[in-house]
């Protein structure tokens, strides 16, 4: 049996979805890791965004230093103020929630150790000292996995679930290539998982995107209730339906508080003036994390990678497709973790019936689930110690 070491990542820049998705995705990863000895969490990364994005999250109204890549969002103060507010949410609520959920996980706050946002990504590193701490540890995990298995059946693989940017993965790949590892050797034991068009197109991360392309398992968009081809989709963009909120109380008070603030159920206390914070019901990036810890689904898709020159199309009704060689190909579909599953996970439902369709807003299963009598006390469903 193949062991899987999973890295969970969020960029946190410009939109609020990561504030909720990091909580839901981490809870799902923790649940699986507690019940499956073949799944381990390698690290939780916050702030994996484009060069200069970290600077703006720390200094939303200062000009971006000239050595950073250009991003048109830098000119939009409202976006930068939101990125700064997202980071303040992570520093004040999110990091504490993850520590309570999984006290043994290594957390990497890329902004906290980023010299005031002045560091640029280094995709051509030759020494470990040129990498971020997260990239160093990820590269070490990949090397360790390469040492454990052959071509036919690796004994260990590493996956980087990218909730936005994949710069840490790109740094690690560039470093390992410079150290003499073959691309095929790395690819055998390492994959980047990413969903959606926005992660691929809107983050302006051309260099990191090109480096990680052939290592990427591209999930279909996790937002919609159904895909353009009619297949059911997770609907993770709308985790709050029928006014049933995600309380998170079963994972402890810090986690509950973070979930409440992320959704706007409780006010953000002491938000720094000039920064903005917007509540959300969007948890779509949690689908990438759920896929990454689903060993069977992950390994079944292990050889389904993007090819050189292939892209995720940015056209209407193409959220389930890959574009390459002048034609469309079906992306890896993943709807095993849908909005009902996420709500059961967070709220502690004892009802184990799955929905038959993610766009069935009020199926009998969900009606029973929505009943407050089905909520259970904190820490009662799994042993979270």
Image (spheres, rainbow, N blue to C red):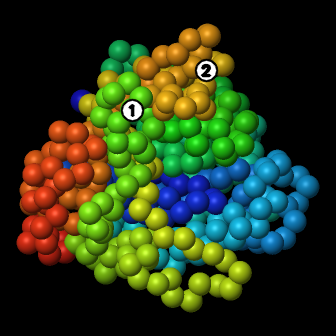
Is residue 168 shown left or right of residue 63? left
Question: In this rendering, does residue 112 appear at all?
Answer: no
Q: Name which quarter of the figure residue 372 lies in.
A: bottom left
Question: In this rendering, does residue 76 appear at all?
Answer: yes
In the foreground, 296 or 37: 296
The mark that comes first in sequence, 2 or 1, is 1
Residue 257 spot, x, y in % from top left: 37, 79
Residue 271 spot, x, y in % from top left: 59, 84
In the foreground, 19 or 278: 278
**Does 168 appear above or below 112?**
above
Q: Measuring 18% from the left and 44% from the top, which residue is drawn there?
A: 355
SS category of the residue bearing label 1: loop
What residue is pinned by disc 1? 227
Q: How many marks?
A: 2
Instruction: Kindly check if marks 2 and 1 are in contact, taking CB atoms under 8 A apart as contact.
Output: no
Which dot marks residue 218?
none
Q: Badge 2: how crowded within 10 Å, few (<14), some, or many (20+)?
A: some
Residue 272 spot, x, y in % from top left: 65, 85
**Does 191 appear above or below 326?**
below
What residue is pinned by disc 2? 310
- Of tags 2 and 1, the one toward the viewer is 1
Is residue 174 shown left or right of residue 372? right
Residue 185 spot, x, y in % from top left: 52, 22
In the foreground, 173 or 247: 247
Q: Badge 1: how crowded within 10 Å, few (<14), some, or many (20+)?
A: many
Q: Measuring 59% from the left and 30% from the top, which residue is drawn there?
A: 315
Q: Measuring 44% from the left and 57% from the top, which residue is drawn there?
A: 282
Is residue 293 shown left or right of residue 356? right
Q: Residue furthest bottom?
A: 270
Q: Measuring 39% from the left and 32% from the top, which residue is drawn there?
A: 227
């Amino acid at each position: 049996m193949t062991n899987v070491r999973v890295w969970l990542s969020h960029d946190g820049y410009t939109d609020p979805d990561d504030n909720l998705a990091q909580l839901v995705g981490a809870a799902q990863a923790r649940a699986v890791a507690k019940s499956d000895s073949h799944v381990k969490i390698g690290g939780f990364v916050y702030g994996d965004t484009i060069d200069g994005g970290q600077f703006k999250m720390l200094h939303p109204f200062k000009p971006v230093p000239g050595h950073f890549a250009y991003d048109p969002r830098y000119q939009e103060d409202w976006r930068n103020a939101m990125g700064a507010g997202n980071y303040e949410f992570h520093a004040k609520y999110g990091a504490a929630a993850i520590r309570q959920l999984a006290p043994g996980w290594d957390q990497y706050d890329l902004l906290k150790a980023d010299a005031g946002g002045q560091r640029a990504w280094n995709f051509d590193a030759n020494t470990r000292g040129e990498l971020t701490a997260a990239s160093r540890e990820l590269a070490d995990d990949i090397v360790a996995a390469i040492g454990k298995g052959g071509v036919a059946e690796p004994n260990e693989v590493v996956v980087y679930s990218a909730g936005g940017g994949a710069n840490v993965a790109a740094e690690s790949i560039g470093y390992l290539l410079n150290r003499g590892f073959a691309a095929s050797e790395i690819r055998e034991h390492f994959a980047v998982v990413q969903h959606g068009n926005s992660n691929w197109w809107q983050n302006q991360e051309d260099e990191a995107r090109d480096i990680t392309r052939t290592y990427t398992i591209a999930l279909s968009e996790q937002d919609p209730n159904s895909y353009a081809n009619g297949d059911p989709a997770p609907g993770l963009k709308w985790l709050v339906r029928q006014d049933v909120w995600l309380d998170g109380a079963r994972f402890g008070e810090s986690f509950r508080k973070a979930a409440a603030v992320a959704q706007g159920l409780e006010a953000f206390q002491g938000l720094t003036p000039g920064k903005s914070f917007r509540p959300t019901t969007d948890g779509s990036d949690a689908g990438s994390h759920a896929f990454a810890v689903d060993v069977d689904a992950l390994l079944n898709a292990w050889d389904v990678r993007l090819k050189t020159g292939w892209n995720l199309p940015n056209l209407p009704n193409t959220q389930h497709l890959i574009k390459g060689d002048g034609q469309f190909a079906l992306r890896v579909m993943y709807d095993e973790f849908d909005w009902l599953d996420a709500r059961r996970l967070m709220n502690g439902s004892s009802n184990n019936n799955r929905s038959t369709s993610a766009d069935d807003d009020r199926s009998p299963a969900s009606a029973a689930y929505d009943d407050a009598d089905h909520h259970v006390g904190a820490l009662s469903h799994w042993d979270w110690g």
